[in-house]
Image (cartoon, helix red, strand yellow):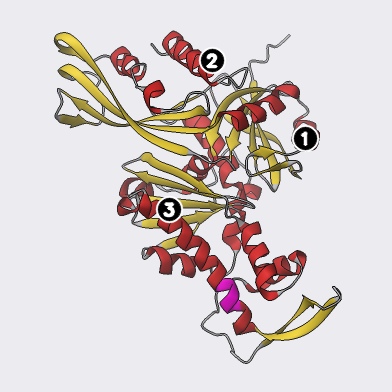
């Protein structure tokens, strides 16, 4: 009888609007194959918060069952996104010294991570670690190198980009997966995953801002010199644009969504400014009141709303002094399909802008070649390539911040020290 040495792992993108699942098999030679997928509308979850545990669990389970039915296989190991979370970025140094000048080893590089002054800089009771990314290696206090291993030195300093999220929200999310008997092997910041899925190598080097526009959140990830140098999110997604339209032109939310999808946010050069569109405004008694409105007037309102959202994001990034390294903007996510979005972003950020679909790898189906799947495919890319130097946590069993951090340090030293 043959022995099946295949492993199966699930990739799950959890967002306010949908839950997407992709199941991959991995053979003994580390070759990946897509064996199943599922997608459902998500309920009971918004902006990283679980509003209804039962409804949210059911959404995840339904998407997973669809994928497992197609794969004819059940899974237990998953990699998940933190797509609607509010992130914090910290930039912390760590240094290790040697008693005499010698070659730096791989173990030295791992050990210096355990010396990061985490608890002195981060509120360990309220924040959960997601990523620790080495940004810069310095030997003997003044020489910057790409890889210190093998260099002769008396000390090594590493500057790290540390990303955290709210510990309670993180713990609540993990508890849902545990209730479904799923073992979360890795968690990845949604914006980080999206960037991995859409950026070409040149983008990562020159300095690029990736904006993933979802249903309730817009995440921003900045890459430079092949590293994630900043990660941020705002509670401004596609729904916020729709809701603002609904209020400003006095139509129901469903009507605002229809108008947004059909007409977009910026007038095309070919627009006839005498064109009218029909819309159903809310009348005095709450009934539908069909009216004709100049298309240019509607687009002016839609443009101003969208431009305002991008301006808020730009100001937030300006305040944090991280835009100076941005030379390109790449927009993805379901909200990136809004007509005119590219031109508005170009006006705000004053640099080249493109709307991006995820780069489809050979193991994947072309059906994922849409912006709304960028985070899902980025999870796979992260797991497959095991992004150099980055460490993503195994999950904590509870929401106690101190226990979480203590478990991390113990795990790190046992596995990487």
Query: Can you identify the residue that label 3 sits on?
Result: 316
Query: Can you identify the residue that label 1 sits on?
Result: 70
Mark 2 Cα-neighbour bin, 10 Å: few <14, some 14–19, many ≥20: some
Residue depth check, mark 1 versus mark 2: number of the one nearer the observer: 2
Q: Main secondary structure of the magenta part?
A: helix
Measured as percent of width and height from the top left, residue 8 is found at 65, 24
Give the residue furthest to the bottom.
Answer: 274
Q: Front-most of 9 and 20?
A: 20
Looking at marks 1 and 2 on the same chain, the residue that comes earlier in the sequence is marked by 1
Mark 1 Cα-neighbour bin, 10 Å: few <14, some 14–19, many ≥20: some
Q: Front-most of 109 and 82?
A: 82
Looking at marks 2 and 3 on the same chain, the residue that comes earlier in the sequence is marked by 3
Q: Front-most of 74 and 27?
A: 74
State whether residue 269 is above or below residue 197.
Answer: below
- Can residue 113 be seen here? The reply is yes
In this picture, residue 206 sits left or right of residue 278:
left
Stretch in magenta = 299-303
Mark 3 Cα-neighbour bin, 10 Å: few <14, some 14–19, many ≥20: some
State whether residue 346 is above or below residue 188.
Answer: below
Measured as percent of width and height from the top left, residue 161 is found at 37, 33
Are discs 3 and 1 less than 8 Å apart at CB? no
Tell me, for residue 403, which label it has, or none.
2
Residues at marks 2 and 3, CA–CA distance in whole angstroms: 33 Å
Quadrant of the image for the N terminus? Answer: top right
């Amino acid at each position: 009888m043959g022995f099946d040495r295949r492993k199966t792992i699930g990739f799950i993108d959890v967002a306010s609007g949908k839950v997407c699942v992709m199941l991959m098999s991995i053979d003994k030679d580390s070759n990946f194959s897509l064996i199943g997928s599922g997608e459902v509308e998500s309920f009971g979850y918004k902006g990283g918060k679980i509003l209804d545990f039962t409804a949210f669990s059911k959404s995840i389970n339904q998407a997973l069952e669809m994928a497992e039915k197609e794969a004819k296989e059940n899974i237990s190991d998953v990699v998940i996104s933190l797509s609607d979370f509010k992130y914090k970025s910290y930039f912390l140094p760590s240094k290790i010294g040697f008693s005499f000048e010698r070659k730096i080893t791989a173990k030295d590089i791992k050990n210096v991570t355990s010396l990061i002054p985490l608890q002195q800089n981060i509120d360990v009771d309220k924040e959960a670690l997601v990523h620790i990314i080495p940004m810069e290696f310095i030997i003997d206090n003044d020489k910057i190198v790409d890889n210190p291993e093998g260099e002769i030195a008396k000390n090594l300093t590493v500057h790290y980009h540390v990303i955290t999220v709210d510990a309670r929200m993180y713990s609540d999310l993990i508890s849902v997966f545990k209730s479904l008997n799923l073992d979360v092997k890795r968690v990845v910041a949604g914006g980080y995953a999206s960037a991995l899925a859409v950026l070409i190598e040149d983008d990562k080097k020159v300095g690029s801002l990736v904006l993933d526009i979802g249903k309730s959140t817009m995440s921003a990830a900045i890459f430079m010199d092949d590293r994630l140098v900043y990660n941020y999110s705002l509670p401004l997604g596609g729904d916020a644009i729709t809701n603002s339209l609904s209020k400003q032109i006095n139509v129901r939310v469903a009507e605002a969504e229809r108008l947004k999808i059909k007409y977009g946010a910026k007038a095309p050069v070919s627009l006839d400014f005498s064109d009218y569109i029909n819309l159903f405004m809310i009348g005095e008694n709450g009934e539908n009141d069909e009216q004709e409105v100049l298309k240019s007037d509607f687009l002016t309102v839609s443009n101003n709303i969208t431009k305002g959202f991008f301006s808020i994001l730009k100001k937030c990034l300006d305040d944090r002094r991280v835009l100076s390294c941005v030379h390109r903007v790449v927009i993805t996510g379901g909200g990136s399909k809004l007509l005119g979005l590219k031109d508005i972003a170009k006006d705000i950020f004053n640099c080249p802008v493109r709307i991006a679909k995820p780069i489809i790898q050979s193991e994947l189906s072309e059906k994922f070649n849409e912006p709304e799947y960028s985070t899902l495919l980025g999870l796979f890319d992260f797991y497959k390539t095991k992004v150099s130097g980055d460490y993503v946590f195994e999950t904590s069993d509870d929401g106690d911040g101190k226990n979480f951090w203590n478990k991390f340090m113990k795990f790190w030293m046992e596995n990487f020290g």
